[in-house]
Image (tube, grey):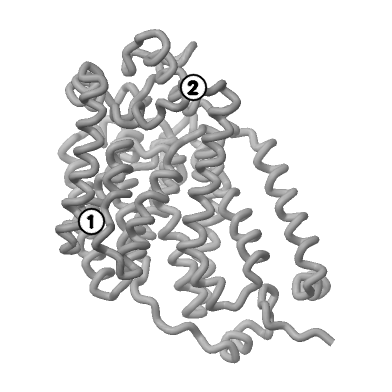
C-alpha cells in the first residue's frame, strides 16, 4: 500500500495509474453482463426513420420483436429528426458522443470545485472521477441503452450554472427544452416557482410550450395521440412492478395488492414533494443553487410513476455534492455512507430480486436505489463553507496527499 501511495504521488506514476484505471474501467464496461445493445436509441432511430421515410405514425411504431415503442413527447421526435439522415452506426456514435460531452460538463460543474479546493492534480483527478462515474449503473445503462437522460441533465444544470454565477436572467431555456423532450425535468419549473424565480419559471414554461407547439404544427396527429392517449398508458413503457422501476410507484407495485392504491401513491408523493419544496427553499436561502437542483432531481425520480435505473442519473448530482461536502467537512462517517451508496449503485444489486419481489429481504433489496434516493433527499447539506486548511487536512488524514499537485520531491 505504501509503494502504491508513493507511486501515485510522483508525476511519473500518475500516467501509469490513470492508464491502468481507464483500461480496467473499459474492460468492465465492454464485458458487463447488463450491456443493453443500444436498445433505446434503436427505438428512437426506428420510430423517426419510419415517420420520415415511410409516413408512419410515431406512436404506432414498435421495435421489431417487442412491444416497446416511442414514449417521449412529439418534440423529442422532432429533435431526433437528424437520425433519419444517417446510418445506424452513426446514430449510435452520435448518442455516445452527446452523452460523453454531457458527462464531461456535469463533472466539470459539480466536481471541479472539490478538485481546486483539495489541490488535486487536475487531469489525474478527473481521470479517476470519470472512471468512477462511468462505473455507476445508471451511467453505463444510459450509454448502453443509448438514452438521453445525461444530455437533458446537462441542459438543466446549465441553467443551475447560470443561476449560481449571477446570470440568472438568462436561465430557464435549458429546463424548458429538457421538459419538452421528456416530462421528468418539468419538475424543475416547479423548483423555480417554489424558490421565487418567477421570471425564470416563465422562461422555462414558455420554452417548453413553444417547443411543444412546434411539434404540434409539424405533426398534429402525433401530438393529439400523445397528449390524449399515449401519455396515460403506462403499459407502453413496461410493468410498474418490474425491479428496474426505482420510484415510489415501483415500491408500491412490488407490494402487490397491498400497495395497489392510487391514493397511497398520491400520499407518498405529496410527502416527498413537501420535503422537497421545504429543502429547496432552504438551499436557496443558504445560497446553494446546485443543491436545490440536485434535490429536484431526487424528487423527480421518486414521484415519477416510472423511474428506470438509467433515469437515476438525475440522482447522481446529489451524491456528488454530498461527497464534496463530506470531503470539505472531513466527515468520515458521511464519506463512508457516500462510498457505500456508490458501491451499491455500481453493483446492480436490485437485479438479485428480478424474479422474486416477495418477502422482507426483497422489499429492502429490490428497492435499494429508492432508499438511497430518499436518504440523499434528507441528508444533502446546504451551503459552501470555507474548506479546511491544508495543514488540518494533512493532519487529519495522516499526511496522505495522493492527488495533491503541490508535492515537493527530492
Q: Nearer the viewer, residue 340 or 306?
A: 306
Q: Residue at x 58, y 87 (%)?
A: 390
Observer-side mark, 2 or 1, equals: 2
Q: Residue at x 72, y 83 (%)?
A: 407
Q: Is residue 391 above or below residue 230?
A: below
Q: Quadrant of residue 16?
A: bottom right
The label number, if any, that marks residue 85 in the structure image: 2
Q: Is residue 47 above or below residue 258?
A: above
Q: Position of residue 175 (x, y in %)?
A: 29, 49
Q: Is residue 126 left or right of residue 81?
A: right
Q: Is residue 43 above or below residue 339?
A: above
Q: Decide which of tag 2 and tag 1 comes sooner along the chain.
A: 2
Distance CA(mark 2)–CA(mark 1): 37 Å
Can residue 323 be seen by looking at this rendering? yes
Total numbered badges shown on the rendered structure: 2
Q: Secondary structure at mark 1?
A: helix
Q: Residue at x 67, y 78 (%)?
A: 405
Q: Secondary structure at mark 2?
A: helix
The residue indicated by pointer 1 is: 191
Q: Position of residue 26 (x, y in %)?
A: 69, 44
Amino acid at each position: 500500500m505504501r509503494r502504491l501511495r508513493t507511486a501515485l504521488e510522483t508525476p511519473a506514476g500518475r500516467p501509469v495509474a490513470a492508464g491502468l484505471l481507464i483500461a480496467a474501467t473499459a474492460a468492465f464496461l465492454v464485458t458487463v453482463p447488463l450491456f443493453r445493445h443500444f436498445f433505446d436509441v434503436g427505438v428512437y432511430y426506428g420510430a423517426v426513420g419510419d415517420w420520415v421515410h415511410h409516413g408512419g405514425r410515431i406512436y404506432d411504431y414498435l421495435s421489431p420483436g417487442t412491444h416497446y415503442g416511442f414514449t417521449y413527447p412529439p418534440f423529442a421526435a422532432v429533435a431526433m429528426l437528424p437520425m433519419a439522415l444517417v446510418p445506424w452506426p452513426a446514430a449510435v456514435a452520435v448518442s455516445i458522443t452527446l452523452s460523453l460531452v454531457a458527462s464531461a460538463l456535469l463533472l466539470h460543474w459539480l466536481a471541479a470545485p472539490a478538485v481546486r479546493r483539495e489541490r488535486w492534480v487536475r487531469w489525474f483527478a478527473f481521470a479517476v472521477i470519470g472512471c468512477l462515474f462511468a462505473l455507476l449503473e445508471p451511467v453505463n445503462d444510459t450509454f448502453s441503452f443509448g438514452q438521453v437522460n445525461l444530455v437533458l441533465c446537462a441542459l438543466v444544470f446549465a441553467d443551475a450554472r447560470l443561476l449560481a454565477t449571477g446570470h440568472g436572467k438568462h436561465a430557464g431555456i435549458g429546463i424548458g427544452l429538457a421538459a419538452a423532450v421528456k416530462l421528468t425535468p418539468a419538475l424543475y419549473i416547479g423548483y423555480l416557482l417554489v424558490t421565487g424565480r418567477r421570471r425564470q419559471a416563465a422562461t422555462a414554461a414558455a420554452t417548453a410550450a413553444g417547443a411543444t407547439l412546434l411539434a404540434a404544427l409539424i405533426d398534429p396527429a402525433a401530438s393529439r395521440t400523445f397528449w390524449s392517449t399515449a401519455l396515460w398508458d403506462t403499459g407502453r413503457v413496461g410493468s410498474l412492478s418490474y425491479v428496474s422501476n426505482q420510484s415510489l410507484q415501483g415500491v408500491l407495485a412490488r407490494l402487490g395488492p397491498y400497495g395497489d392504491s392510487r391514493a397511497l401513491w398520491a400520499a407518498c408523493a405529496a410527502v416527498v414533494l413537501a420535503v422537497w419544496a421545504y429543502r429547496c427553499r432552504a438551499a436557496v436561502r443558504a445560497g446553494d443553487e446546485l443543491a436545490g437542483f440536485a434535490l429536484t432531481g431526487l424528487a423527480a425520480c421518486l414521484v415519477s410513476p416510472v423511474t428506470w435505473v438509467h433515469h437515476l442519473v438525475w440522482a447522481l448530482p446529489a451524491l456528488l455534492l454530498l461527497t464534496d461536502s463530506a470531503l470539505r467537512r472531513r466527515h468520515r462517517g458521511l464519506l463512508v455512507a457516500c462510498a457505500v451508496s456508490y458501491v451499491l449503485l455500481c453493483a446492480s444489486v436490485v437485479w438479485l430480486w428480478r424474479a422474486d419481489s416477495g418477502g422482507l429481504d426483497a422489499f429492502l433489496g429490490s428497492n435499494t436505489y429508492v432508499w438511497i434516493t430518499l436518504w440523499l433527499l434528507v441528508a444533502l447539506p446546504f451551503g459552501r463553507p470555507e474548506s479546511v486548511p491544508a495543514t488540518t487536512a494533512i493532519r487529519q488524514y495522516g499526511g496522505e496527499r495522493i492527488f495533491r499537485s503541490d508535492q515537493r520531491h527530492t
